[in-house]
Amino acid sequence: MTKDFLTSLHNRQKLDLDLKTFINRIDASLLSLVFVDADKFKSINDIYGHSVGDEALKHLSYKLKLYCTSLNAEAYRYGGEEFILLCFKDKSELIPILNNLRIEIKRDKIKNTDYNINLSVSMGISFWRDVTSIKELLKVADDNLFKAKDQGRDRIIYN
């Protein structure tokens, strides 16, 4: 009940449970929430069809899972083409790893399709130590994601 069927990542229900637990951990000061959104995803579905869109989501999920160990993170499908990473990593280490992830996603072709398609992602980050509630943690990351998209996509924005 806590896994997304398509991507095998955790779902929003699991995200809600984990957030309530993670903010009470002894290392909660390291907690960050990273919104990851596939740029211009609708055009993939419109041009190539939903089955290719599904492969793109699986590809992106695979990349996120690969990076969970180095980010000390859990990955969640938030909805549609939006994902969340909950990371326990110092900001000085977090940002370079996320940037490598962003670059790798853009560089690699989507597997299991007959098309030569690349994805790019935008990311918005918030830090538990800078907010006072889970709601604010989500809002700040979402606002930063919106800024990343507004500033041209394929970038990471954080405070």
Image (tube, helix red, strand yellow):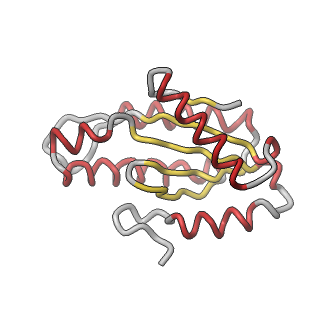
Count of numbered badges drawn on the protein: 0
* Residue 1 in the image, given as x and y percentages of width and height: 47, 78
User: Between residues 114 and 146, which one lies in front from this camera angle?
Assistant: 146
- Kindly give the residue lying farthest to the top in the view shown: 151
**On screen, residue 38 above or below 24:** above
* Residue 130 in the image, given as x and y percentages of width and height: 80, 41
**On screen, residue 15 above or below 35:** below
Q: Quadrant of the C terminus?
A: top right
* Residue 142 in the image, given as x and y percentages of width and height: 58, 41
- Kindly give the residue lying farthest to the bottom in the view shown: 1
User: Between residues 104 and 152, which one lies in front from this camera angle?
Assistant: 152
Q: For the point 52% across and 58% down, which residue is it?
A: 76
Hey, which quadrant is residue 16 in on the image? bottom right
From the viewer's perspective, tell me whether residue 58 is left or right of residue 116: right
Q: For the point 83% across and 55% down, which residue is it?
A: 27
* Residue 73 in the image, given as x and y percentages of width and height: 63, 54
Q: For the point 72% across and 66% down, which residue is it?
A: 20
